[in-house]
């Protein structure tokens, strides 16, 4: 790989910013961890076509790539000797919210709080909420399969605590340039995809082969960890790709291979009326379980434990 030729090619095909100067490389050499890895260079794509162009140029030169959102990762996930693509500056829009279905479509660089702000207009929230919610992006949350302290609501009364649980469909881009949507795929559709062949069919076939060859071993030996930040979610492959027919989870299996997330559809969790309550309220009506029982503050009376949240969510649903 010749960095000068790579830079020239990137400048030719990318409309956004191509920053290979020492200052920019230093700025992107760290994330929220103690690691420091100076990148080859930085691309700030203007849009998704720029992401595709960046990956294409890097592929031509055999350059490694790394997607970056808010850069708040704690274990070095977001710094490497690669061409870093910063999605957070331009590729950061909420493209739409389907209130009826409680699904949002977003670009990968959207900051979680931006999505939450838009969702709040419809009394909705997105379940997973890392402490870094005012900086972290949906793309980065996918990469880390983020959760968060309030995600417990989503764990018990929504689709699940992890970002993967709240992901309906993903558009992914592989290093070899295949751009495709993945999501729930019924048996007959999957057979059609495999029969159609090509790179897409090859990937679906390989996932099935992997599952068939190793599902017993995965079941017996793979650590049963509720949320895995790094490594491959092989247990999702076992659980979801065939039984639940959810290839979006498989895309998260492949996130180390996938180089970008162009858009996401997210399931939504109804917004609770409040997230904390005065202890006096808890003490005065600790066991009340009547949905209609609200006190004068509008706070639902049975907020003494997590179970109470169910009622609040149902009320708002
Ligand atoms: C103080 C502090 C508190 C935290 N609290 C929590 C918490 O409560 N819960 C929690 O889960 N985490 C927490 N984290 C970790 C981290 O903030 C979250 O996981 C956050 O969601 C990461 O988002 P990000 O946009 O910063 O991701 P980044 O750090 O930018 O990226 C994370 C990973 O995703 C990949 N990635 C980024 N964009 C894409 C894309 N478009 N396509 C494919 N891969 C991509 C990156 O390459 C990297 O591997 C905390 C971190 C800090 C510093």
Image (spheres, helix red, strand yellow):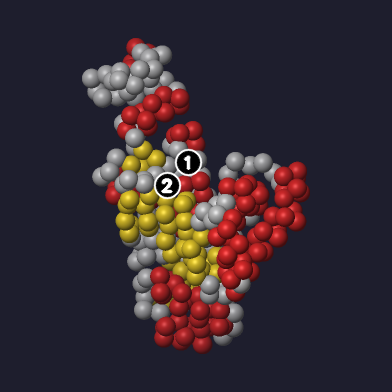
Observer able to see residue 140: no
Does the residue at mark 2 contact the one at mark 1 (Cβ under 8 Å)? Answer: yes
Identify the image quadrant of the N terminus.
bottom right
Which residue is drawn at the image coordinates 47% and 56% (left, top)? Answer: 169
Left or right of 227 on screen, residue 274? left
Q: Residues within 10 Å of mark 1 (few under 14, many from 20)?
A: some
Identify the image quadrant of the C terminus.
top left
In this view, 259 is above or below 307: below
* Image x and y of residue 271, in percent: 34, 37
Tell me the SS state at disc 1.
Answer: loop
Tell me the SS state at disc 2.
Answer: strand
Left or right of 53 on screen, residue 188? right
Residue named by callout 1: 159
Q: Closer to the camera, 235 or 78?
A: 235
Left or right of 121 on screen, residue 76? right
Residue named by callout 2: 267
Q: Closer to the camera, 184 or 220?
A: 184
């Amino acid at each position: 790989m010749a960095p000068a030729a790579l830079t020239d090619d990137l400048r030719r095909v990318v409309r956004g910013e191509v920053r290979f100067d020492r200052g920019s490389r230093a700025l992107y050499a760290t994330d929220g961890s103690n690691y420091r890895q100076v990148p080859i260079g930085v691309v700030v794509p203007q849009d998704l076509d720029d992401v595709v162009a960046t990956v294409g140029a890097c592929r031509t030169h055999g350059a490694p790539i790394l997607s970056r959102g808010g850069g708040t990762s704690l274990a070095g996930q977001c710094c490497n000797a690669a061409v870093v693509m910063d999605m957070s500056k331009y590729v950061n829009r909420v493209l739409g919210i389907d209130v009826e279905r409680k699904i949002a479509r977003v670009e990968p660089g959207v900051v979680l709080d931006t999505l939450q702000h838009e969702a709040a207009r419809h009394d909705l929230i997105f379940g997973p909420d890392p402490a870094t919610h005012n900086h972290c992006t949906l793309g980065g949350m996918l990469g880390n399969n983020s959760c968060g302290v309030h995600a417990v609501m989503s764990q018990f009364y929504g689709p699940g605590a992890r970002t993967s649980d709240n992901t309906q469909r993903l558009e992914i881009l592989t290093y070899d340039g295949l751009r495709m949507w993945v999501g729930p795929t019924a048996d007959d559709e999957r057979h059609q995809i495999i029969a159609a062949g090509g790179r897409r069919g090859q990937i679906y076939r390989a996932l099935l082969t992997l599952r068939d060859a190793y599902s017993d071993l995965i079941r017996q030996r793979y650590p049963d960890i509720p949320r895995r930040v790094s490594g491959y979610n092989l247990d999702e492959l076992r659980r979801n790709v065939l039984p639940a027919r959810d290839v979006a989870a498989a895309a998260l299996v492949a996130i180390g291979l996938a180089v970008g997330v162009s858009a996401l559809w997210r399931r939504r969790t109804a917004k609770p009326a409040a997230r904390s309550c005065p202890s006096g309220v808890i003490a005065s009506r600790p066991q009340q379980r009547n949905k209609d029982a609200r006190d004068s503050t509008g706070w639902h009376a049975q907020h003494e434990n997590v179970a109470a949240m169910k009622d609040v969510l149902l009320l708002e649903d």
